[in-house]
Image: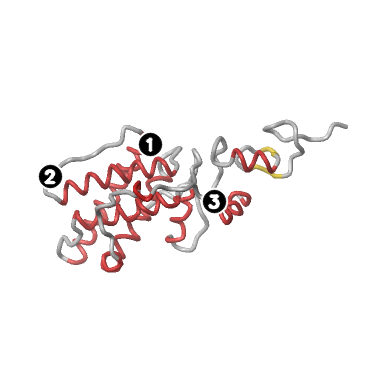
Amino acid sequence: MARAKCHLCEARPPRRACPALGRDICAACCGAQREETIDCPFDCPHLREARRHERKPERDPRSIPHPDVDITERFLVENEVLTVSAARFLLLAALDTPGAVDSDVREALEALARTYRSASSGLIYESRPANMIAAGIAERFQKYIAEFRERMAQETGVHSIRDQDVFGVLVFWQRMAWNRDNGRRKGRAFLDSLFALMPSEPPQENLVSA
């Protein structure tokens, strides 16, 4: 009887059950194709193990988003609720946008940051990504943040969330996404990290309700 072979390379013996493909593949193909050609679910045990040992590509410090903006610890403390809420809104927006990966989120964050930077200067200018997936994330985030600002205004009686604070928070998350980039075409390491800020529940692909 012929021995089973990896579904991808059809050469090596399969050692891992791939939840994305529904087939068995070898460890080499898993490592090479993970988040490159394979849309790995967050709860894949092989992906989660790989996250623990993943080596991120070298980054040019000069490429950090908005290097002229100083995000201080004091700013983050004073805007803790907004910062955590923005992370949740980003995650919800991405999970509610089919096909979204970290690169789409980074593009959405850049467009959003430009929009709020303009708004904080008194200009009305909305930057919209050409990438439709990134545009969908940005649009959903805008909806969530608008609802959040209105809710906070109703609770406090004042409109206390300023455009410049939203801009600063967006830059903070841009830098986190920049730092988490694992260089894989379908990488979602940054999105995966945002689950740590959510209520204690396992990662879900369809977490869409705010």
Left or right? Give the position of 115 relative to 88.
left
Give the labeled residue for mark 2: 123
Cα separation between marks 2 and 3? 41 Å
Q: Nearer the viewer, mark 2 or mark 3?
A: 3
Cα separation between marks 2 and 1? 26 Å
Give the labeled residue for mark 3: 55
Label 2 SS: loop
Q: Amino acid at mark 1?
A: Ile
What is the quadrant of the N terminus in the image?
top right
Q: Amino acid at mark 3?
A: Arg
Q: Nearer the viewer, residue 144 or 196?
A: 196
Label 3 SS: loop
Earlier residue among tags 2 and 1: 2
Expressed as whole percent of the image width and height from the top left, the position of residue 36 reads: 54, 37
Q: Residues within 10 Å of mark 1 (few under 14, many from 20)?
A: many
Earlier residue among tags 1 and 3: 3
Give the labeled residue for mark 1: 133
Q: Nearer the viewer, mark 2 or mark 1?
A: 2
Q: Nearer the viewer, residue 122 or 63?
A: 63
Expressed as whole percent of the image width and height from the top left, the position of residue 104 reads: 39, 40
Label 1 SS: helix
Earlier residue among tags 2 and 3: 3
Q: Nearer the viewer, residue 26 or 207?
A: 26
Q: Nearer the viewer, residue 75 or 18?
A: 75
